[in-house]
Structures are given as C-alpha cells and as structure tokens.
Amino acid sequence: MFSESVLRNIIIKAEKDKNKNVKELILNSCEKVGFISQDDIELKSSNYIWIETVCNIHLMAMDIIDSLDEDNCIPLSLEDVHAEEKTKAKIIGGEVAKLLILSIPPFGSSRKQSSLSKLKTVNV
C-alpha cells in the first residue's frame, strides 16, 4: 500500500486536476446526448468553444467562492475529490442546459438555421 505522504501527494495532484476533470465530465455528457461530437472537440467547433467558455466561467466563480470558505481544505481522500468533481459537473451541466434552452430563438423568429437545428432529434 502507499505511505501516508505518497497518498497525500496523490490527493493533492487530484485536487489540482479537479477543474480539468469537471470539464471532461461535462464534455462527455454533451457528447453522449449529441450536442457535440468528437470532431467538435478535436476541431474546437463553436459549440465546443461555447461549452468550454461556460465551464471556465462557472469553475472560476466556484473557485472564488471556495477561496472565501475558511473551512475549505485539502480533501481527505480521492473519493472526496471525485465526489466534488461530480457535484460541480452536475451543477455546471445544469447551467449549460439552462443556457442552451435560453438560446432558443423566439417563436416566429426569422433567424436562419441555427447550430441547434443540427442537433439529433431525441425521441420521448
């Protein structure tokens, strides 16, 4: 098994990679539902850049709030880090969804084909 200092270093590294992992969770979710594709990610399409920007702004806001929290400390385990990543991804993913809904053109709008019309149809 790992020594306590090695384990602590692993946890500290995981904490530093947390924001990158949160973005990956969100991007994977967006890809899973068809909002973006692997090509979008590789080519850095406008949808990908939009998601990346939304994630970065929300993560920065969360980091500011975390920095003000006097009780905020290094997590005790990797499970704590992963739980925080999932929680942040769920919150930010919800915000991505809200912003996506808010981007729907008004009814009767004469706007040409938007990037939203390229999305796959979801059967309900």
Image (spheres, rainbow, N blue to C red):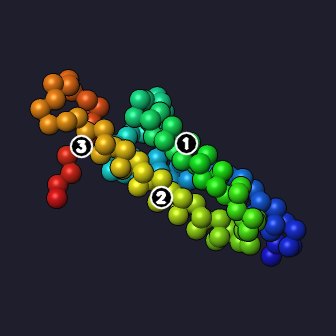
Quadrant occupied by the C terminus: bottom left
Q: CA distance from mark 3 to mark 2?
A: 24 Å
Q: Which residue is mark 3?
A: 120
Q: Which mark is residue 28?
A: none
Answer few, some or many: residues within 10 Å of disc 1's Cα (few below 14, many 20 plus, some between 14 and 19). Answer: few
Q: Mark 3 packing: few (<14 Cα in 10 Å), some, or many (20+)?
A: few
Q: Residue at x 36, y 50 (%)?
A: 97
Q: Position of residue 63 (x, y in %)?
A: 65, 52
Q: Amino acid at mark 2?
A: Ile
Residue 101 sits in quarter:
top left
- Give the distance between the C-alpha atoms of the residues marked 2 and 1, in whole angstroms: 13 Å
Q: Identify which residue is drawn at 48% across, 53% down.
A: 92
Image location (x, y in percent) of residue 21: 59, 52
| Residue at the extreme bottom | 1
In the image, taking residue 9 as reference, residue 56 lies left or right, namely left
Q: Secondary structure at mark 2?
A: helix
Image quadrant in which you'd find residue 37: top left
State the residue position of label 1: 57
Q: Secondary structure at mark 3?
A: loop
Query: Could you tell me the amino acid type at mark 3?
Result: Lys
Q: Mark 1 or mark 3, which is nearer the start of the sequence?
A: 1
